Amino acid sequence: MYLFYAGAYNNEPQQIGVARSRDGLTWERLSDKPLLPNGPAGSWNSSESGHPAIFQDPVSGRTYLFYQGNNDQGRTWYLSKVEVKWKHNKPYLAD
């Protein structure tokens, strides 16, 4: 199982990480760095990249990470998506 989670608390900044488990009880982070960090200063998601949701298209089999971002400490929200690809049983974000 893979868990895509938001690390940090509301706009501190929030970023997305990934953990893996074989039994659903014991989890290990795949990296000490976020899979999807918040954006640089001035970008649409400079305060947050969080609230992750994974979707696998049943027709194409492609996997997408949907997430929320903002640049104003949570006063507004924007939604975006990025394709997730897999290599050696680890997710990475498509360019």
Image (cartoon, helix red, strand yellow):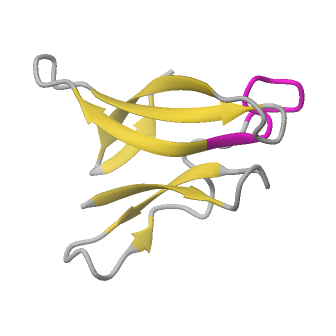
Name, please, the residue furthest toward the left: 59
Q: Nearer the viewer, residue 70 or 93?
A: 70
Farthest-out residue, front:
75
Please state the horizontal and vertical placement of residue 40, each as a whole percent of the image: 82, 32
Q: Is residue 19 above or below residue 72?
A: below
Q: Nearer the viewer, residue 2 or 9?
A: 9
Residue at screen point 73% across, 29% down = 76
Residue 71 drawn above or below residue 9? above
Between 85 and 42, the one nearer to me in the picture: 42
Residue at figure coordinates x 55%, y 25% from the top left:
79
| Residue 80 left/right relative to 62 | right
Q: Residue furthest bottom?
A: 26
**Is residue 6 shown left or right of residue 72?**
left
Q: Where, by quadrant of the figure, is residue 18 drawn?
A: bottom left
58 sits left or right of 31 in the view? left
**Residue 31 in picture, x, y percent from top left:** 53, 61
Q: Start and end of the magenta stretch?
A: 39-49
Residue furthest to the right in view is: 41
Quarter that holds the N terminus: bottom left
Q: Residue at x 75, y 33 (%)?
A: 39
Q: Number of numbered discs present?
A: 0
Taking 57 as reference, is 73 above or below it? below
- Asked if the stretch drawn in magenta spans residue 19, the answer is no
Question: Toward which corner of the image does residue 24 lie, by quadrant?
Answer: bottom left
Q: Return the residue nearer the eye: 89 or 40.
A: 40
Residue 23 appears at what percent x and percent y?
Answer: 19, 77
Q: Main secondary structure of the magenta part?
A: loop
Residue 14 percent coordinates (x, y): 68, 51
> Who's the residue at 12% across and 25% down the image?
58
